[in-house]
Image: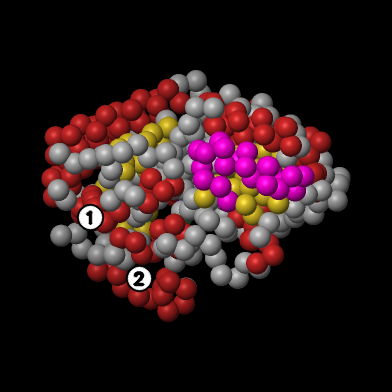
C-alpha cells in the first residue's frame, strides 16, 4: 500500500485555512472517496507526491502540460523572463509575438486579447457577443463547462457534474435565466432554441469536443449545423477551445474539423503551464473591446511576462511538424492497449478519443451525450481510479474528466499504464 501519510496531514492543515483544502474543487478527490495527493514536484510524464510516491501522470494539470512537466526549454524561458522582471502592468513586445502566433494557428482569429484564465476568456467572449448582437440570451450545452462566470454556471459539467450539482448557488436567477442549456450533440435542440427565442440569442457557446463530461467528439455535421444556425439567426459562434486549443491540432478543433468560430476562447496550453488565456476572433467583434470600443475588460496580470514567455516557448515547440502526428500515435496506442486489456479482462469499456485526450467509460454503449456519461458505471470508475493510483498511475479523479497525454509520455509509460489497467480491470470485475 502506497504511503499517503504526508498528503493526508497536508490536507488536514489545508482544510483549516482553505475551503475544502483546495483552490479548485475537482482537486479534492471528493468523488473517489480518498483525499488528494499533495504534490512535491513533477517532471516529464511523472508527478511525485509529498510522500515520495511517483506516478505516471495523465492529469497534466488538467490539460496545459502537453510538453510534459518542467520542460527544460520552457523553464529556461521563464527563468530568463523572471530575471527581467515579473510584472510590469504595461505592454511588451512578447505579447504581440504571442498574439501573432495564436492568429497564425487559427484562421478564424484576427485579433487576440490575453487574459489570465479560461473563465475570463469565456466571460469576455460572452460580453463581446452580447454587445455585438445587442441581445442577451446565450445557448450552452448541458454538461459543457466554460469556467465559473455567472452566465456559464448553468447545467455545467466538470466538478459540478461530479458533485451532482449542475448549477451554482449565488448566481442571480435573472442571469441564469438568460442561459439556455441544450443537450450536446443534439442538432435539433439548438434549432429549437433559436425557434423558441427568436432574435434573443446573442451566442452559442460550445466546446467543439466536449471534454468536461469526459471526452465526447462532435457527431457528424453537429458543428457545421451550429455554424449555420448562428449565421442564419445573426448569433455569434463561440468555441470554447480551452481544452482543445493547441491540443487536438495546432489550430485546435477548428483545424481538425474545418469549422470557423467567430470568437475562440483559449486557456491551458496557451499559457504554457502558467496562468494565461486568450480570447480571439473576428476584428469587427474584437474591436468592440476597450480601449477601442465600449466593452470593458482589464487585468493587472493580463499578458504577464512570465506567462507569455512560457506560452511563446510552448507554442514554438508545438509548431514543429511532427508534434500532432506523435500525439495521435501515443493516443492511438493507449486507446488500443486499454481496449485490449478490457477485452481480456471481460470488462465492458467504451473509449472516446480525440488525438491525445481520451476517456475510458465503463459502459458497453456508445457515449455521445451527457446522459450517456451519467449512465456509465461511475461506482466502477471509482474502484478503477483507486486501483490505478495504487499501481502508480495518476488519473483525473472523476469519470467526467479527460485523460491527457503529453509528448513526454513514452511507449514504456503507455505499456505500464495498460498493464496496470489490466490488473485493475481484473480486480473490479
Ligand atoms: N476545471 C478543471 C477540470 N475540468 C479543474 C481545474 C483544476 O482543478 O485545476
348 lies left or right of 37: left
Determine which quarter of the picture holds residue 95.
top right
42 lies left or right of 79: left
What is the crowding at mark 1: few (fewer than 14 residues within 10 Å), some, or many (at least 20)?
A: some
382 lies left or right of 405: left
Residue sitting at x 29%, y 65%: 33
Percent position (x, y) of residue 127? 74, 51
Disc 2 designates what residue?
A: 10
Percent position (x, y) of residue 67? 44, 37
Is residue 375 at least partly visible in the picture? Answer: yes
Percent position (x, y) of residue 71? 44, 40
Disc 1 designates what residue?
A: 383
Is residue 43 at least partly visible in the picture? Answer: no
Residue closer to the observer: 280 or 425: 425
Percent position (x, y) of residue 98? 66, 36
Which contiguous range is marked in magenta?
181-203
Does mark 1's beta carbon lie closer than 8 Å to ligand 1? no
Residue closer to the observer: 52 or 358: 358
Secondary-structure class at tag 2:
helix
What is the crowding at mark 2: few (fewer than 14 residues within 10 Å), some, or many (at least 20)?
A: some
Residue closer to the observer: 360 or 29: 360
Secondary-structure class at tag 1:
helix
Determine which quarter of the picture holds residue 21.
bottom left
What's the mark number on residue 121?
Answer: none
Lower position in the chain sequence, tag 1 or tag 2: 2
Residue sitting at x 40%, y 27%: 328
Residue sitting at x 53%, y 56%: 155
Residue 66 lies in the magenta stretch: no
Amino acid at each position: 500500500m502506497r504511503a499517503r501519510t504526508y498528503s493526508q496531514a497536508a490536507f488536514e492543515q489545508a482544510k483549516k485555512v482553505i475551503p475544502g483544502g483546495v483552490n479548485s474543487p475537482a482537486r479534492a478527490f471528493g468523488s473517489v472517496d480518498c483525499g488528494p495527493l499533495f504534490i512535491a514536484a513533477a517532471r516529464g510524464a511523472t508527478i511525485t507526491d509529498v510522500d515520495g510516491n511517483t506516478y505516471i501522470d495523465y492529469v497534466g494539470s488538467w490539460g496545459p502540460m502537453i510538453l510534459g512537466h518542467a520542460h527544460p526549454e520552457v523553464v529556461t524561458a521563464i527563468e530568463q523572463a523572471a530575471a527581467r522582471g515579473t510584472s510590469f502592468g504595461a505592454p511588451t513586445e512578447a505579447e504581440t509575438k504571442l498574439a501573432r502566433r495564436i492568429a497564425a494557428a487559427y484562421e478564424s482569429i484576427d485579433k487576440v486579447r490575453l487574459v489570465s484564465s479560461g473563465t475570463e476568456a469565456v466571460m469576455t467572449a460572452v460580453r463581446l457577443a452580447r454587445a455585438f448582437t445587442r441581445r442577451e440570451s446565450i445557448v450552452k450545452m448541458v454538461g459543457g463547462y466554460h469556467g465559473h462566470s455567472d452566465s456559464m454556471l448553468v447545467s455545467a459539467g466538470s466538478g459540478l457534474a461530479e458533485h451532482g450539482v449542475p448549477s451554482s448557488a449565488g448566481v442571480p436567477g435573472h442571469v441564469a435565466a438568460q442561459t439556455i442549456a441544450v443537450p450536446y450533440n443534439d442538432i435539433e435542440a439548438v434549432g429549437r432554441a433559436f425557434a423558441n427565442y427568436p432574435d434573443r440569442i446573442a451566442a452559442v457557446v460550445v466546446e467543439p469536443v466536449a471534454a468536461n463530461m469526459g471526452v465526447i467528439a462532435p457527431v457528424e455535421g453537429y458543428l457545421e449545423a451550429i455554424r449555420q444556425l448562428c449565421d442564419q439567426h445573426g448569433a455569434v459562434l463561440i468555441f470554447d477551445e480551452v481544452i482543445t486549443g493547441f491540443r487536438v491540432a495546432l489550430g485546435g478543433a477548428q483545424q481538425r474539423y474545418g469549422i470557423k468560430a467567430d470568437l475562440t476562447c483559449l486557456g491551458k496550453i496557451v499559457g504554457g503551464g502558467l496562468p494565461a488565456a486568450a480570447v480571439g476572433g473576428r476584428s469587427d467583434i474584437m474591436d468592440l473591446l476597450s480601449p477601442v470600443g465600449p466593452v470593458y475588460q482589464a487585468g493587472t496580470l493580463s499578458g504577464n511576462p512570465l506567462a507569455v514567455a512560457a506560452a511563446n516557448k510552448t507554442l514554438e515547440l508545438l509548431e514543429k511538424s511532427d508534434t500532432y502526428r506523435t500525439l495521435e500515435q501515443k493516443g492511438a496506442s493507449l486507446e488500443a492497449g486499454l481496449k485490449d486489456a478490457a477485452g481480456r479482462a471481460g470488462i465492458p469499456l467504451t473509449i472516446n478519443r480525440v488525438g491525445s485526450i481520451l476517456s475510458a467509460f465503463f459502459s458497453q454503449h456508445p457515449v455521445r451525450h451527457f446522459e450517456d456519461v451519467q449512465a456509465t458505471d461511475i461506482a466502477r470508475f471509482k474502484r478503477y481510479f483507486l486501483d490505478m493510483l495504487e499501481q502508480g498511475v495518476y488519473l483525473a479523479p472523476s469519470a467526467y474528466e479527460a485523460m491527457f497525454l503529453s509528448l513526454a509520455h513514452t511507449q514504456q509509460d503507455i505499456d505500464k499504464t495498460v498493464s496496470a489497467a489490466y490488473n485493475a480491470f481484473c480486480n473490479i470485475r
